[in-house]
Amino acid sequence: MRRLSVLLCLALATTPHLATAAGEVLLNQPESVVFDAPRNRYLVSNFADGNIVQIDADLNQAYFDTTLTRIAGLFIEDDTLYVASNLDPWVGLVGYDLTADTLSLFIPIPESTLLNDLTTDDAGNMYVTDYWDTKVFQVDLGAQTYEIFALDGLLDPNGIVYDAPHDRVIVTSHFAGYPLQGISLADGSVSNVVTTSIPSQDGLGRDAVGNFYTSSWYFNAVFRYDPDFASAPVLVSDGHSGPADIYVDALNHILCVPNFHTNTVEFIPLEPTGVPAGEGAASFTLADNYPEPFNATTTIAYELANTTHVRLDVLDGRGRRLETLVDGLRPAGAHRIAWSSRDLPSGVYFYRLVAEGRAATRKMVMVK
């Protein structure tokens, strides 16, 4: 049954409470993250307290809004930030006008139990998973109405992403084998797309070339599938702590991983071609740095199968290049190079090796 939404007059007048807090950690069980490109900031939802936190280009955190009480998924469409809100008095879909940073709409979905992740199609519809009640809602954003879109054949749907070439949305599942399931936009029918054997999947994302990414709390890792799910999943990044609704920033080629248990968000560089860390082993291998974690200096080692041109960069926590350590022809065999952090602050950094059209990226932690 399709229901009309109710716009709250009070909500329309609400302005997010922006409060800068330089150096302070405001994340509290971060669940979802999106990139607001016109304003060059990331927005992160706090599941525990309902606050939305913004992270600027220098990784400073500030409150974007403190109105809501418990929230999960975030999605940006046409300068509106949509939020899956799931605790009274805000149970439903909340929208913020990002041009003015104001809370601009509220579509109540009172029969939902835990609205989780969001995605949109090309026809003005938003799809919202209800994790606890095992269903997916379809919201007509223009008419501000909703209905139950899919119910039968699902089990604890969490992450959701739009798959335009196949006219479907894809959701995670807790059935045996942990399949990714496709829901046809034509008739709402559910089918298994691929059996992953990856337990406790949470978020789904997609990059600029169509690869799918899924996070797993069981492995504390993120895996990648090719656009057609033709090959086995590739490990992209591990060592996380409750990786929730991951997000692929296609503009900057960054994989964003909110760590639910440690109140952090990791920004992991991806290659513009969509090649994730760990591939390219046939032409080279990139080892873990040592010591790790390190204080001021660490050593990076790699091995080449052939004489080839190599570029080795050090990146900051937002994936921006800090320094190029190698950029030139190197012979086959083992190589080592030391990197000194100089006056850089403690935190997470990355090093990325590109050779023969392939790339690998690894994380390193500096503690002073």
Image (cartoon, rainbow, N blue to C red):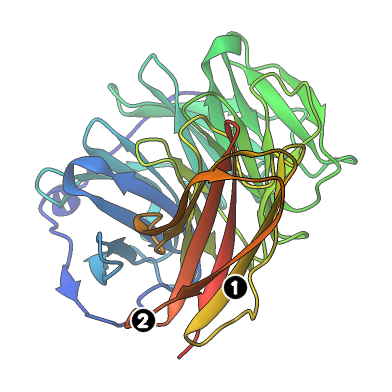
**Which quadrant of the rendered structure holds the C terminus?**
bottom left
Q: Residue furthest top?
A: 186
Q: Is residue 261 visible?
A: no
- The residue that mark 2 highlights is 342
Give how far apart the Cα atoms at labels 2 and 1 are.
Answer: 14 Å
Q: Residue furthest bottom?
A: 368
Q: Secondary structure at mark 1?
A: strand
The answer to whether mark 2 and mark 1 are in CB contact below 8 A is no
Residue 229 placed where, x, y %? Answer: 73, 24
Name the residue located 38 percent from the left edge and 47 percent from the top edge: 34
Q: Name which quarter of the figure residue 224 lies in.
A: top right
Amino acid type indicated by mark 1: Thr
Among the two numbered marks 2 and 1 on one chain, the one whose residue lies closer to the N terminus: 1
Name the residue located 13 percent from the left edge and 58 percent from the top edge: 15
Seen in the picture, residue 130 relative to 240 is either above or below; the reply is: above
Label 2, residues with CA under 10 Å away: few <14, some 14-19, many ≥20: few
Q: Is residue 295 visible?
A: yes
Q: In the image, is 245 to the left or to the right of 154?
A: left
Seen in the picture, residue 279 relative to 362 is either above or below; the reply is: above
- The residue that mark 1 highlights is 299
Residue 150 placed where, x, y %? Answer: 63, 26
Q: In the image, is 82 to the left or to the right of 38?
A: right
Residue 241 placed where, x, y %? Answer: 64, 69
Name the residue located 38 percent from the left edge and 58 percent from the top edge: 318
Amino acid type indicated by mark 2: Arg
Name the residue located 59 percent from the left edge and 81 percent from the top edge: 293
Q: Name which quarter of the figure residue 142 lies in.
A: top left
Label 1, residues with CA under 10 Å away: few <14, some 14-19, many ≥20: some
Q: Residue furthest right?
A: 176
Q: Secondary structure at mark 2?
A: loop
